[in-house]
Amino acid sequence: MDMKRNYYEDVQLFSSGVVVFWFAVLILFLAFFPFIFKNYYVYLANYMAINVIVAIGLNLLVGYTGQVSLGHAGFFAIGAYGTITLMSTFHLPFLLALPASALVAALFGFLLGLPALRLEGPYLAIATLGFGLTITKVIGRIELFGGRQGLHAPDLIIGPWHVTTDRDFYYLAVTLTVLLTLAARNLIKTKVGRAFIAIRDADIAAESMGVHLTYYKTLAFAVSAFYTGIAGGLYAFVLRFIEPEVFTLMMSIMFLSMVVVGGLGSLMGSITGACLLSWLDLQLRNILDIPYVGEWLDALSKSWFSITGVSNIQFILFGLIMVLIMLFEPLGIFGFWIRTKKYWKMWPF
């Protein structure tokens, strides 16, 4: 029986030698990945790593605390614009500009968390949606942030290290992703994480047991926004140029889709969901190049949507995936993993 006998067993990072072995294999694979695969796949890995950070942060809010958000594209924009502005205008080094912009995003997350004290469900989703739409409009009207013209990312220099290629950026993005994943894993094992879960399961009962709802709900928003701000700062250097139109409602929906598809309340689910939808996002941008399927979609788009409607096919597929997940496996990819694990433990019975 898998029974924990003391608190240390619950918080320890590696539960067995097998886990240590596979973790070492994973780290070695990540270390040699850029030397094994082509440059496109390195770029894809960078894109996945950024979305993994967002998905983990959003899952801390949605999956572990039970607070819905459709405004994370706003925090993403704050992180991106904040990092570039602090580096270009105020000449801060990257290692200071990135966490500083993430802290600004966390401050906005704290302020957005205040309505969560009185709102829940669809009402909270609408409130966060309004924030996400408003923040990009405001940024687009401030000349410090380039207005509608956007901003170009400066050269990325970390001490003596000049990050100029996708391979260089890969090691930066993956290192931050691993560190933030471990931080999130440790967070949910602490008093704070247990308070988040208690609020998700029954906030009234949690409050009666001494959980400070005001503190922990706003903290959940702040931590989630901090993660998203870090990812936004990294994303600015992947694009090399940002403008307000990049951070749309569809971006927030895609972030939420990653969490739902991967599995609510699961860090592993956040990682798998982010990787899957990141890969689909890039692949479906060239969907017209697929033989026969591309021609059919082009004709379908012109007949039933609009001339440019085919560009939204990816979001239709994302929605379809979410509906199928909700119908057949509410726990997402993590739920499939649990079923598979139980099956092989009981096999052949």
Image: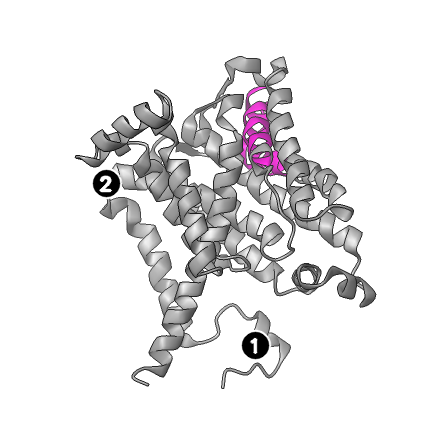
Residue range in magenta is 75-102
Q: Is residue 75 visible?
A: yes
- From the image, give the main secondary structure of the stretch colored magenta: helix
* Residue 76 falls within the magenta-colored stretch: yes
- Please tell me which residue is depicted at 62% across the width and 51% down the height of the picture: 61
Secondary structure of the residue carrying tag 1 is helix
Q: Is residue 197 left or right of residue 274?
A: right
Residue 184 tag number: none
The residue lying furthest to the left in this view is: 291
Give left or right: position of 152 versus 98. Answer: left
Taking the magenta stretch, the answer to whether it contains residue 105 is no
Q: Which quadrant holds the C terminus?
A: bottom left
Dot 2: element: loop
Give above or below for 309 relative to 207: above
In the image, which disc is placed on residue 9? 1
Q: Which residue is mark 2?
A: 38
Q: Give the farthest residue toward the front.
A: 303
Amino acid found under the numbered disc labelled 2: Lys
Which residue shows up at 58% across the image and 61% down it? Answer: 186
Marks 2 and 1 sit apart, C-alpha to C-alpha, by 41 Å
Position of residue 143 relative to residue 7, above or below, is above
Q: Is residue 46 something that shows in the picture?
A: no
Q: Earlier in the sequence, mark 2 or mark 1?
A: 1
- The residue closer to the viewer here, 15 or 203, is 203
What is the x, y in percent for residue 113? 72, 43
